[in-house]
Image (spheres, grey):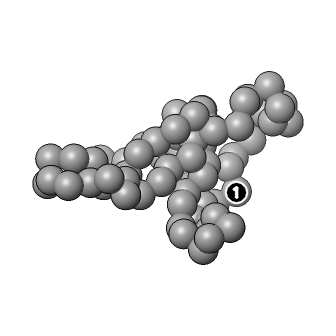
Amino acid sequence: MAMEKIGALWQKSDRNGQPYFSGIIGGKSVIIFKNKYKQADNHPDYLVYPGQDKTKLPPKDEGQEIPY
């Protein structure tokens, strides 16, 4: 069974050189940061936040693919 693609992420660096990810998952823009407060194995490794407001993104043409 083929896996269904639900989004894409790009790795970037903040102004301090720390890596983070930004992209689209499930049609929503997200930003993902490493959890620098992790103290136990049951704490998440990464935290996901809403990204850029979709109203500011250019309109998506039907059938248009994310370039990856």
- Residue 53 appears anywhere in the view: yes
Q: Is residue 27 above or below residue 4?
A: above
Describe residue 63's horizontal placement relative to residue 3 as left or right. Answer: right
Q: Is residue 39 above or below residue 5?
A: below
Q: How dense is the environment of label 1, judged by Cα within 10 Å: few (below 14), some, or many (20 and up)? A: few
Amino acid residing under circle 1: Pro
Q: Secondary structure at mark 1?
A: loop
Q: Is residue 30 above or below residue 39?
A: above
Question: Could you tell me which residue is drawn at 68 percent across and 49 percent down?
Answer: 66
Question: Could you tell me which residue is drawn at 55 percent across and 57 percent down?
Answer: 21
Residue 54, given in percent of the width and then of the height, sits at 73, 29
Residue 31, given in percent of the width and then of the height, sits at 56, 46
**Picture quadrant of residue 10:** bottom right
How many numbered tags mark residues here?
1
Instruction: Give the camera-side residue of 63 and 50.
Output: 50
Instruction: Give the camera-side residue of 53 and 68.
Output: 53
Describe residue 29's horizontal placement relative to residue 7 as left or right. Answer: right
Describe residue 20's horizontal placement relative to residue 3 as left or right. Answer: right
Instruction: Give the camera-side residue of 31 and 28.
Output: 31
**Picture quadrant of residue 4:** top left
The quadrant the C terminus occupies is: bottom right
- Residue 61 appears anywhere in the view: no
Residue at the extreme left of the image, as rendered: 41
Question: Could you tell me which residue is drawn at 53 percent across and 67 percent down?
Answer: 19
Question: Could you tell me which residue is drawn at 54 percent across and 69 percent down?
Answer: 18
User: What residue does disc 1 label?
Assistant: 67
Residue at the extreme top of the image, as rendered: 55
Residue 12, given in percent of the width and then of the height, sits at 62, 66
Instruction: Give the camera-side residue of 63 and 56.
Output: 56
